[in-house]
Image (cartoon, rainbow, N blue to C red):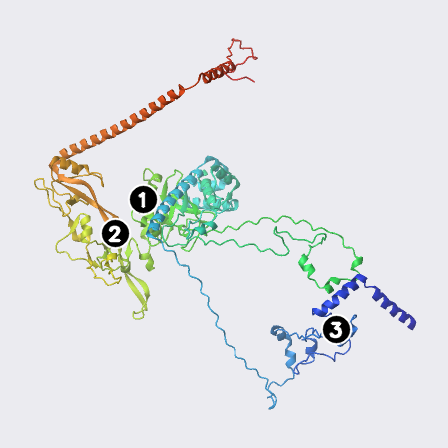
């Protein structure tokens, strides 16, 4: 038995020695010196026997359980391990490593360590207490303030340009809405949408006249509710619709702007969308309008126009962000495909060459019998191409397009939105907040099937005069007249009863608008005004207040709030100086005291020559209201003598400033006036008429237009002016005749030159030209029709060669 055991042990040793191939022995010999230079964590072996020779020092307070449970592996080089290791090398001693638990992990198992310890016992005198005093000081974290984006100032010239672009944009949007409304009346579109309505829906949409007023309105709303539910299930939103137009603070910001082409289509695409029922929610509202019109329901197409704002406030276009370069990983090449080692195929992909070359030799040894294993070559299965993800559509929570349906029972229009708000007859739920960057309600236009439009903005906004009106063109000088001209092509030729009822409803909505609660909303309000918002030339003629508004905090006032008086806009009057009223044909009454005195404006020439700011302050300007003035009456013309001012002319700013007994004959401004020439030719007294000034900066140039003469000389002066015009016409005709004669003379001269040049030709050149003409005549053959209609072989066909 002993011999067998020894033989077995001897054979085992040989087998162990021969089990390692020579190739691995060479790799092992290469690896061992490298491991001595590069410290590597030694392989752990299972230690048997008593663990008396521990290198780690355990705290005396710790129990023996801590040795087995709390301590993790300790990487310590033991002398016994070094003796057992084959091929012993001089390995330098490593530092002792000790692993500690985190406080969270110790909280569960640390209770057993303190059992049997007297925590109340005081430490001995010669033993340190072991108390640790820690002073924690919170380090102040520097607060990084976000950079404040200052709004770019808009110059006066840019404001004018923005207003012109705003008007043009509004006209373009009106034309676009008119075109879409016309598409909703297309018979082919309505024919495609009509099958979506079942018999029950049509019954509700067409209430009988025998029903009561409430019954007809309820039947219509029930039918619209069913149609809206059906439309939400049928129509799919796949594109982005109209959104708010924003200004760009910099030209670079326009590079980040992309035009969505989902809605750029013509009428044929609109017909195709009526069959597929896909598109933007704006398109869904338009097709919904066509669907209701196909059922003979009086329907309007309503749109909230989104023009460029002409005000300096409001959001701007997002800043331009340059595209960030894409980072390439070692596992991918420039084309995005994984890079594999040539000649090697792996089932789960191939590792990168960089990672394989950095593996230590000990890790590359692998299994001793790895050479006997032949791994089959397996190619990576091709991955299917990734499906393109649909980009999410981020739009406003409030609609741009919706419809209005006419309730014949109550003779009123009410809104219907089947896709966005999913509401019926709730006009107050359509206005977006001021912070919405995608939608702004300033113009709400409703188009009927007859292509006539109405402005119904007051039905949907809550504060038309306080907020909405400031974003409309009516708030600018002459804006109301321009808006009436813009809407004139879409106006109905007559005013129907429903239009009168609607006008009354919109006026009532404006009258029910409450008083603003914000101080900023009182500025330029058409009905209310604050004293702080009065302009330089505005005067409050009545101190009767109509309310109070909170204007901050004041501890000295009961309640702690400072209140400011509110006045009516009709009590605010425009005041002008005496010179300004004179240019309007009025003068200040005798004995009137000025209502307000404003300081004189500072001029550039007020600064001293030395560059200082000390200058002699001029007297203020006195302002008067219109009630303090009367119509100016100039001195009359006596015995044909026209009165003049110190400059030798007469101020005629308005027609009422023409003196009694005189007449103003107008001429062409900035030219040699015919009236003054005629008056000098007739030797009658006259005075040039000063009609205004043309200002370029602060310098004004007088505009002289026509002259003022006595009324009895009017016919004579007009006859002379007519003679001047006839002479001018004759001179113009003579100038044109002379120009024509010169052109004909030049033409005849060129013909003579050509004739003389043609006479210089040689006889040889003439013979060559004659031969060329003879050859051309021989090539031209004339075919005569012999009248045989049945002969198809001949040439004919009206000058063409038949096939």
Mark 3 or mark 1, earlier in chain? 3
The vertical placement of 494 against 53, above or below, is above
Residue pushed farthest left? Answer: 639
Residue appearing at x 64%, y 48% in the figure: 384
Residue neighbourhood size for the residue with mark 3, other residues' Cα within 10 Å, grouped as few (<14), some (14–19), many (≥20): few
State the CA–CA distance, disc 1 to disc 2.
29 Å
Q: Do we see residue 779 in this rendering?
A: yes
Image coords of residue 155 (percent x, y): 34, 53
- Relative horizontal placement of residue 112, taking residue 612 as reference (left or right): right
Which image quadrant for residue 171? top left
Residue neighbourhood size for the residue with mark 2, other residues' Cα within 10 Å, grouped as few (<14), some (14–19), many (≥20): few
Which residue is nearer to you in this view: 267 or 723?
Answer: 723
Question: Is label 1 or label 2 in front?
Answer: 2
Badge 3 is on which residue?
90
Badge 2 is on which residue?
698
Instruction: State yes or no: discs 3 and 1 in contact (Cβ < 8 Å).
Output: no
Residue appearing at x 19%, y 32% in the figure: 724
SS at circle 3 = loop
Q: Do we see residue 515 in this rendering?
A: no
Question: Is label 2 or label 3 in front?
Answer: 3
Badge 1 is on which residue?
482
Which image quadrant for residue 82? bottom right
**Quarter that holds the N terminus:** bottom right
SS at circle 2 = loop
Which image quadrant for residue 748? top left
């Amino acid at each position: 038995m002993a011999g067998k055991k020894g033989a077995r042990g001897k054979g085992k040793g040989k087998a162990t020695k021969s089990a390692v191939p020579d190739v691995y022995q060479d790799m092992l010999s290469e690896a061992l010196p490298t491991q001595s230079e590069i410290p590597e964590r030694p392989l752990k072996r299972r230690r048997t026997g008593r663990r008396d020779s521990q290198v780690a020092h355990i705290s005396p307070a710790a129990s023996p359980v801590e040795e087995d449970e709390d301590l993790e592996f300790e990487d310590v080089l033991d002398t016994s391990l070094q003796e057992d290791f084959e091929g012993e090398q001089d390995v330098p001693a490593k530092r002792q490593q000790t692993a500690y638990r985190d406080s969270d992990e110790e909280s569960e198992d640390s209770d057993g360590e303190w059992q049997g310890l007297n925590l109340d016992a005081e430490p001995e005198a010669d033993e340190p207490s072991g108390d640790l005093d820690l002073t924690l000081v919170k380090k102040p974290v520097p607060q990084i303030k976000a950079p404040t984006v200052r709004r770019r100032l808009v110059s006066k010239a840019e404001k004018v340009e923005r207003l012109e672009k705003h008007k043009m944009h509004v006209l373009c949007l009106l034309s676009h809405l008119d075109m879409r409304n016309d598409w909703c009346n297309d018979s082919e579109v309505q024919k495609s949408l009509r099958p979506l309505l079942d018999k029950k829906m049509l019954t509700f949409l067409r209430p009988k006249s025998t029903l009561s007023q409430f019954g007809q309105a309820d039947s219509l709303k029930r039918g619209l509710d069913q149609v809206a539910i059906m439309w939400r299930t049928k129509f799919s939103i796949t594109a982005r619709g109209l959104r708010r137009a924003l200004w760009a603070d910099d030209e670079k910001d326009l590079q980040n702007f992309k035009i969505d082409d989902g809605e750029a289509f013509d009428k044929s695409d609109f017909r195709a969308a009526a069959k597929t029922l896909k598109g933007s929610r704006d398109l869904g509202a338009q097709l919904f309008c066509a669907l209701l019109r196909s059922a003979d329901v009086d329907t309007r197409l309503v749109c909230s126009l989104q023009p460029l704002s002409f005000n300096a406030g409001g959001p701007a276009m997002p800043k331009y962000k340059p595209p960030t370069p894409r980072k390439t990983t070692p596992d991918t090449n420039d084309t995005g495909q994984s890079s594999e080692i040539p000649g090697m195929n792996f089932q789960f992909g191939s590792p990168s060459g960089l990672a394989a070359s950095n593996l230590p030799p000990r890790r590359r040894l692998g299994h001793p019998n790895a050479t006997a294993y032949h791994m089959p070559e397996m190619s990576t299965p091709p991955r299917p191409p990734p499906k393109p993800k649909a980009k999410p559509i981020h739009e406003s929570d409030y609609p741009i397009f919706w419809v209005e349906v006419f309730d014949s029972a109550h003779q009123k229009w009410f809104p219907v939105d089947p896709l966005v708000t999913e509401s019926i007859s709730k006009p107050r739920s359509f206005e977006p907040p001021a912070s919405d960057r995608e939608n702004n309600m300033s113009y709400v236009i409703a188009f009927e099937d007859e292509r006539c439009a109405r402005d119904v903005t007051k039905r949907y906004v809550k504060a038309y005069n306080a907020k909405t009106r400031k974003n409309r063109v009516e708030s600018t000088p002459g804006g109301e007249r321009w808006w009436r001209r813009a809407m004139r092509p879409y106006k109905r030729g007559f005013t129907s009863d429903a239009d009168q009822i609607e006008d009354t409803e919109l006026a009532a909505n404006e009258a029910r608008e409450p008083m603003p609660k914000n101080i900023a909303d009182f500025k330029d309000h058409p009905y209310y005004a604050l004293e702080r918002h009065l302009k330089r030339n505005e005067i409050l003629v009545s101190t009767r207040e109509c309310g109070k508004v909170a204007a901050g905090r004041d501890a000295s006032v009961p309640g702690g709030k400072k209140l400011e008086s509110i006045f009516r806009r009709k009590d605010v009057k425009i005041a002008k100086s005496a010179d300004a009223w004179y240019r309007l044909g009025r003068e200040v009454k005798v004995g009137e005291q000025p209502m307000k005195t404003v300081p004189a404006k500072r001029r550039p020439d007020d600064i001293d020559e030395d560059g200082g700011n000390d200058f002699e302050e001029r007297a203020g300007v006195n302002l008067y209201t219109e009630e303090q003035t009367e119509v100016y009456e100039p001195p009359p013309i006596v015995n044909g003598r026209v009165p003049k001012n110190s400059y030798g002319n007469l101020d005629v700013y308005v027609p009422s400033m023409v003196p009694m007994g005189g007449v103003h004959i107008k001429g062409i401004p900035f030219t040699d006036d015919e009236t003054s020439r005629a008056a000098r030719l007739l030797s009658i007294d006259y005075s040039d008429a000063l009609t205004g000034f043309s200002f370029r900066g602060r310098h004004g140039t007088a505009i002289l237009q026509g002259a003022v003469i006595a009324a009895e000389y009017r016919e004579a002066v007009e006859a002379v002016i007519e003679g001047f015009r006839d002479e001018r016409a004759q001179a113009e005709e003579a100038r044109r005749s002379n120009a024509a004669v010169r052109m004909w003379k030049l033409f005849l001269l060129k013909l003579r030159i050509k004739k003389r040049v043609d006479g210089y030709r040689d006889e040889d050149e003439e013979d060559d030209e004659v031969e060329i003409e003879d050859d051309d005549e021989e090539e031209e053959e004339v075919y005569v029709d012999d009248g045989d209609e049945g002969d198809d072989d001949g040439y004919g066909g009206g000058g063409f060669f038949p096939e």
